[in-house]
């Protein structure tokens, strides 16, 4: 049975409970009653959340002046945002003004665009890490987020432990470093060389550092259906589903040449050791590791066997890299000498595996709009049933190829006085419909 019905009727309005802006000098003002629309964004491809909104800035908002003049509003102001969907799911967060863009000015009021970002986003533009890290990559990410001299966040952390270690100096912005480390990380779920690749991103619940395969292991948070049958404003949701998709767009573009060029399914890496001037050529094909991967569907795409060339041309992308041997060994002088021949980073078993997994994940893409559901987050799994294309409209069955589990790659909650909607960009790496779990 459905856990909670999301109805089209419940997408008709939203509730901006409060949005207060504190002056950098003194005082604050709540602009929630003047907001025309608010958009809240999360993405597994972005390290921080953001909010974009429009509000009417009248001439008597602060001591007889507008908000921009009365506070004054100049940027970096702390805001407290509280929004609620029509299923009573709430989002409350502290954000900071990042940009101010007035437009449609009159003598009585001005419509203003505001962009709000998280504190860590702002700090990351001001701070450089400037620190050496030894050991597991997941520990490095945790330190950069919690270290008081770097970001010092108190938000919840969902950091999946990595299998591999990596010694390095981090000089750049902390959020950039965390994102860069994601492609070097191996999940602690399989033997090296089978899979690799993490995502670093923020939701309103906190920061996440999670592997692609662990994301695909999750249970579906919602089971949704899309069809052309009227739902009687939410009263006619089929049994077993949590809600109905209001709009669906499919990215059905299949460009196999583009997939070849980015190395989605077959890669080659050429490794060079500068200490002995030896090089190694390693070829990898996704089909050789398919049984070790966590897939959203049943299998990766099956291509025409006529193009299985084999031999020296059995790859579609080449990566070149110096072998990272003996770099920054940890321990005492004697221990460092003993480790001088150890690899600091193993590109043979990590780099191209991560490249393939990132590109595979975006094989199938769907964009759906549903009634506002603030319980969903980027990185969650959705089960989506889509009817197959059939001449028999009365007895359509679910699509067995593209229906099933999807990861939420991007999320936008839209709130206005008329609508409360959630738009999701969904992605998956494989074909074939698995049963929802």
Image (tube, rainbow, N blue to C red):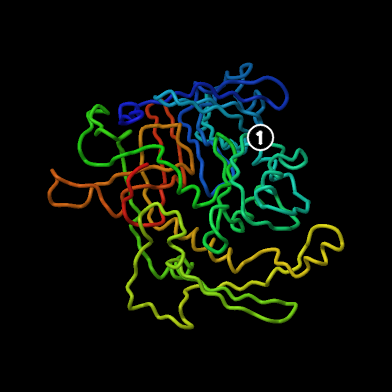
Q: Give the x, y percent position of residue 140.
A: 70, 49
Picture layout, residue 19 above or below residue 385: above
| 113 lies above or below 405 | above
Classed neighbour count for the residue bearing mark 1: other residues with Cα under 10 Å, few (<14), some (14–19), many (≥20): some
State the residue at coordinates (78%, 51%). 131
Say above or below: 123 vs 195: above
**Residue 225 position within the rendered picture, expressed as x and y whole percent measured from the top left:** 29, 40
Judged from the image, the secondary structure of the residue bearing numbered disc 1 is loop
Residue under the point 59% across and 57% down: 183
Q: Nearer the viewer, residue 334 or 206?
A: 334
123 left or right, relative to 88:
right
Q: Name the residue beneath numbered marker 1.
A: 75
Front position in the image: 72 or 187: 187
**Of all residues shown, which one is farthest toward the top?**
63
Q: Position of residue 364 (x, y in %)?
A: 38, 55
User: Residue 345 lies in what quarter of the image?
Assistant: bottom right
Q: Is residue 268 above or below residue 430?
A: below
**Whole-percent x, y for residue 426 in the image:** 40, 47
Image point (76%, 56%), residue name? 169
Look at the image and tell me in which quarter the C terminus lies.
top left
Number of numbered callouts drawn = 1
Quadrant of the rendering where the N terminus is positioned:
top left
**Left or right placement of residue 249 versus residue 78 in this view:** left
Question: Residue at left 73%, top 77%?
Answer: 274
């Amino acid at each position: 049975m459905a856990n909670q019905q999301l109805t089209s009727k419940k997408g008709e309005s939203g509730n901006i409970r409060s949005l207060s802006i504190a002056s950098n000098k003194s005082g604050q003002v709540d602009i929630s009653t003047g907001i025309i629309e608010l958009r809240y964004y999360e993405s597994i491809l972005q390290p921080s959340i953001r909010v974009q909104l429009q509000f009417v800035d009248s001439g008597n908002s602060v001591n007889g002046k507008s908000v921009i003049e009365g506070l004054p509003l100049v940027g970096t102001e702390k805001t407290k945002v509280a929004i609620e969907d029509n299923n009573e799911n709430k989002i409350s967060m502290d954000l900071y003004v990042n940009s101010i863009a007035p437009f449609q000015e009159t003598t009585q009021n001005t419509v203003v665009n505001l962009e709000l970002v998280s504190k860590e986003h702002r700090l990351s533009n001001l701070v450089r890490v400037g620190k050496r890290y030894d050991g597991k990559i997941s520990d490095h990410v945790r330190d950069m987020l919690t270290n008081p001299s770097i970001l010092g966040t108190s938000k919840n952390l969902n950091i999946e432990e990595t299998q591999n270690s990596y010694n390095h100096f981090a000089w750049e912005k902390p959020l950039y470093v965390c994102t860069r480390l994601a492609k070097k990380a191996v999940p602690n779920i399989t033997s090296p060389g089978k899979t690799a690749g993490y995502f670093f991103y923020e939701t309103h619940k906190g920061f996440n550092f999670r592997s692609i395969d662990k994301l695909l292991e999750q249970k579906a948070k919602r089971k949704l259906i899309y069809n052309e049958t009227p739902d009687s404003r939410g009263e006619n949701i089929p049994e077993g589903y949590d809600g109905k998709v209001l709009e669906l767009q499919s990215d059905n573009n299949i460009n196999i040449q583009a997939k070849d060029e980015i190395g989605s399914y077959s890669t080659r890496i050429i490794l060079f050791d500068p200490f002995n001037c030896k090089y190694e050529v390693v070829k990898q094909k996704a089909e050789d590791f398919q049984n070790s991967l966590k897939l959203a569907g049943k299998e990766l795409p099956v291509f025409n066997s006529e193009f299985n060339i084999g031999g020296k041309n059995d790859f579609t992308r080449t990566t070149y890299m110096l072998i990272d041997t003996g770099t920054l060994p940890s321990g005492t002088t004697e221990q460092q000498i003993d480790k001088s021949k150890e690899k600091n980073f193993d590109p043979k078993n990590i780099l191209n595996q991560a490249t393939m997994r990132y590109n595979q994940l975006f094989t199938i893409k769907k964009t759906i709009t549903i009634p506002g559901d603030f319980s969903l987050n980027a990185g969650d799994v959705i089960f989506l049933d889509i009817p197959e294309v059939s001449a028999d409209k009365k007895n359509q069955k679910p699509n067995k190829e593209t229906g099933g589990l999807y990861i939420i790659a991007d999320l936008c909650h839209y709130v206005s006085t008329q609508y409360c909607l959630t738009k999701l960009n969904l992605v998956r790496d494989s074909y074939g419909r698995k049963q929802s779990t």
